[in-house]
């Protein structure tokens, strides 16, 4: 494996960010020795409904979740743009800032990767970054070569051996690691029903949700959008 700058990108709606997201990022950081991991809340997710919580709250929750994690940074790259948050556009911004495709690792759960062929600029997007794909409950990375036989030659299981070259072209790196069986949808439902979410999200995220009364009535209507969308510090991501 080559050394040098290795920059991870973990994007998502993060409505809210939960332990599954953190497990995915941690697994990729450990498997690939990432020097930096940008966690980027999406402004307008192109394949999902509008978020329940505002950009302000989603950025704040991510900031609290990544605090104290070496190398992790929250970015407002996408939140600064009111257009749909396409991954291809985010990667282009990284390239414009001097990051080469071979220095980038787009971190994603295996369940989200199964929809890669519906993403904007597919398959060209696979040339803009390595994809670090992490197993999710019910969707193991070992299934991906069978589901995408035309991409199998680009797939390499982690840990990468000495013969696997990261400098010959972007790879799809398969990381089989345990990740929490939790979803943002389930968390919002539990909160709307008055059930606890202890252990499903970072403690700082839970405190932010409770302090601001987020997601308390997401079944009958949306809440948590009471702050200006761009009043948080800043943004950086794509489809997932």
Image (cartoon, rainbow, N blue to C red):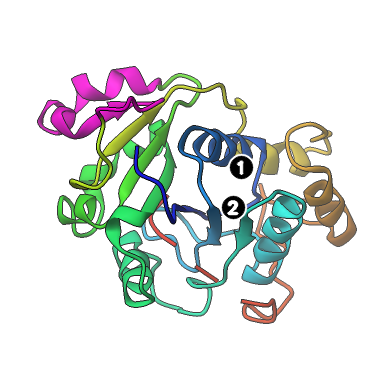
| Res 14 label | 2
**Distance in Å between CA atoms under marks 1 and 2:** 7 Å
> Residue 195 falls in which quadrant of the image?
top right
**Can I make out residue 114 in this image?**
no
The residue that disc 1 covers is 184
**Can I make out residue 89 in this image?**
yes
Q: Secondary structure at mark 1?
A: helix
Q: Look at the image and say whether residue 177 sits in the magenta stretch.
A: no
- Per the rendered image, the range of residues in magenta is 140-163
Q: Nearer the viewer, residue 103 or 42?
A: 103
Which residue: 83% across, 43% down? 203
Q: Position of residue 191 (x, y in %)?
A: 77, 42
Residue 139 as seen in the image, left or right of residue 57: left
Q: Of the two numbered discs 1 and 2 on the same chain, state the one appearing first in sequence.
A: 2
Number of marks in the rendered image: 2
Mark 2 neighbour class, 10 Å CA radius: few under 14, some 14 to 19, many 20 or more: many
Residue 142 as seen in the image, left or right of residue 153: right
């Amino acid at each position: 494996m080559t050394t040098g700058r290795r920059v991870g990108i973990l994007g998502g709606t993060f409505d809210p960010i939960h332990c599954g997201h953190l497990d995915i990022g941690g697994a990729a950081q450990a498997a690939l020795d990432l020097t930096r991991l940008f966690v980027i809340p999406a402004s307008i997710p192109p394949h999902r409904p509008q978020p329940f919580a505002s950009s302000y709250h989603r950025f704040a929750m991510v900031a609290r979740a990544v605090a104290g994690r070496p190398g992790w940074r929250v970015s407002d790259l996408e939140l600064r743009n009111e257009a749909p948050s396409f991954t291809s556009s985010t990667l282009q911004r990284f390239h414009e800032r001097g990051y080469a495709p071979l220095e980038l690792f787009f971190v994603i759960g295996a369940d989200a990767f199964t929809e890669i062929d519906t993403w904007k600029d597919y398959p060209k997007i696979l040339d803009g970054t390595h994809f670090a794909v992490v197993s999710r409950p019910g969707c193991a990375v070992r299934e991906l070569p069978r589901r995408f036989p035309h991409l199998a030659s680009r797939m390499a299981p982690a840990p990468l051996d000495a013969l696997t070259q990261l400098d010959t072209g972007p790879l799809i790196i398969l990381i089989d690691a345990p990740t929490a069986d939790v979803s943002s949808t389930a968390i919002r439902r539990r909160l709307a029903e008055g059930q606890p979410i202890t252990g499903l999200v970072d403690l700082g995220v839970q405190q932010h949700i409770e302090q601001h009364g987020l997601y308390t009535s997401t079944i009958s209507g949306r809440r948590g959008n009471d702050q200006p969308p761009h009043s948080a510090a800043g943004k950086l991501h794509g489809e997932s």
